[in-house]
Amino acid sequence: MDNGYVIPAIVAVTLATFGIGFYGLRVARTTSDFLVASRAVSPNWNAAAIGGEYLSAASFLGIAGLILKYGVDVLWYPVGFAAGYLALLLFVAAPLRRSGAFTLPDFCELRLHSRRLRALATVFVIFIGWLYLMPQLQGAGLTLTTLTGSPYPVGALIVAVVVTANVALGGMRAITFVQAFQYWLKLTALAVPVIFLVLQWQADGRPAVTPPDGPAFRTATTVVVEHPATLTLADGTTREVRPGDELTFAAGDPMPAVSGVAVEATDWLLPSTAGDDDRGLFATYSLILATFLGTMGLPHVLVRFYTNPDGAAARRTTLVVLAMVGAFYLLPTLYGVLGRIYTPHLLLTGHTDAVVVLLPGAALGDGVTGRLLAALVAAGAFAAFLSTSSGLLTSVAGVISTDVLGRGSVRGFRQATLIAGAVPAALALNVSELDVSQVVGLAFAVAASSFCPLLVLGIWWRGLTDVGAAAGILAGGGAAVTAVLLTVVGPPLDGWPATLIAQPAAWTVPLAFTVMVAVSVASRRRVPADVATTMLRLHTPESLRL
């Protein structure tokens, strides 16, 4: 796709990121500035910054691609991503801020007085952060390749370098301003093109999203296959295709059924019926559990609540985030739906994650309007990569600087930032074929199976012990990590093993809670002596303290 507006748009976003980050650098001086912005961020600013870092590549690109590919079955992704803040509001936000901790490992030591538990939490923070960072860099490479034809590593490296520089120079104080700006840019980048896309859809006579025989090609199209697949053609015959095969379709030709893709109207509009048993239902419940509970275990989200002045501000922040995130998630859904009409060829190429950046040009043509809107979407996509990567990198760098390098200083934070940014960049350069939303979903499953039980029980149950917490994290979180590794580098699986590994939260989260409670009860003599004081600190509003 040759669009001369894309590169200037991406350059403008990059320069704005640098410029705003440089402004933040002027007010970032102390270690507290770098780690938690000196706990002086107002609820509205913090909510915009959380929205900026939370709405990642999976939100901007992945959800639309999943809806294009699988239909209503994956609407639980945006629902769960948004609803997760309700659980965060009810159980975690205010007590976590009142704890006075800087990071999740800090909270572990403050609540349970265990250096070993702190070290274990450090390992999981780093793993989740790097697992979440990888698809952000991967999405940047995909976007730039799709829109400009540049090599895949270019986009990934641009985001890695810009984010690492911004975080190293200004820390949390600097990226707060950057992420707040990028939330509004992302919202604008999706909202404005949707207006034109809906008007075009009406002008075209409101073509059906799911015709009786599935999506059809609106114009003569030549598709170059990029992934091996089995196609079922209109006449009922099947054909095996390999990367590099060219397929030509005339205007009006039905889209062939692609193995693993919901093409027919009934498949796309109805919930999954995978298999002859309850695997589809299990996978759905597991996805809901991972997205709903995983939010409260994401280190880059939790660190934001340490930046609020007090617990009441943390709660107000969460309420505003719910509204912001809920409004945003309406838009990728529309892109996925309209993609069935204007970009059905992406189901053949396998690059469904690119529907957001390709849809304006496909629906509106190659004129100035289509090009400008495509450039705006590209700018929003890069804002998504930059803002989420900034938050993740800050949380990982904070933990590495304090718990790995043992240097609680500005210089130590900057050194940790270089380490924290180099590892996921190297991984992303070597892994370009993973589904963006699938990887992010796995990161949510790990967070839901490790830090969610730790925080819920640590905040609301006096009986939690350090041994119980460690055992629960190792059992549930370790099982989820194993599932991630098997999904990414393991052999193909079928049947129930494939379902249990691809969507592990439905069994790893209960496992973590059960083990954490059982081992804590068995080791109740290890309950900290000052647990009453700690619980009072977590649950007493600041206005009532002397």
Image (cartoon, rainbow, N blue to C red):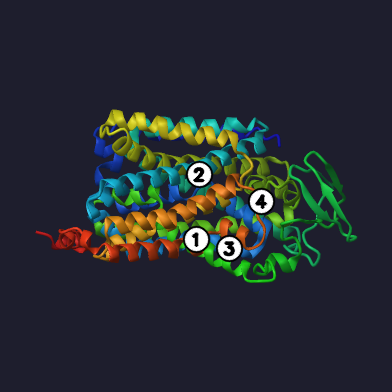
Would you place residue 349 above or below residue 546 in this image? above
Please state which of the two labelled residues, at mark 3 or mark 1, is closer to the viewer.
Answer: 1
Secondary structure category for the residue under label 1: helix
Tell me the number on the disc at residue 505. 1
* Residue type beneath disc 3: Leu
Instruction: Using the image as rendered, state which of residue 210 and residue 407 is in the foreground.
Output: 407
Amino acid type, residue under disc 1 in the picture: Ala
Sequence-wise first label, 3 or 4: 3
| Residue 103 seen from this side | no
Can you identify the residue that label 3 sits on?
75
- Callout 1 crowding tier (Cα within 10 Å): few <14, some 14–19, many ≥20: many
How many numbered markers are drawn?
4
Q: CA distance from mark 3 to mark 1?
A: 17 Å
Left or right of 14: which side holds 68?
right
Q: Earlier in the sequence, mark 2 or mark 4?
A: 2
| Nearer mark to the viewer, of 2 and 3 | 3
The residue shown at (90%, 60%) is: 235
Q: Quadrant of the C terminus?
A: bottom left
SS class, disc 4: loop
Q: Are marks 4 and 1 in contact (CB under 8 Å)?
A: no
3 or 1: tag closer to the N-terminus = 3
Classify the position of the N terminus by image quarter: top right
Mark drawn on residue 384: 2
Q: Amino acid at mark 2?
A: Ala
- Binning the other alpha carbons within 10 Å of mark 4 as few (below 14), some (14 to 19) or many (20 upward) gives few
User: Disc 3 or disc 4, which is closer to the eye?
Assistant: 4
Q: Earlier in the sequence, mark 4 or mark 1?
A: 4
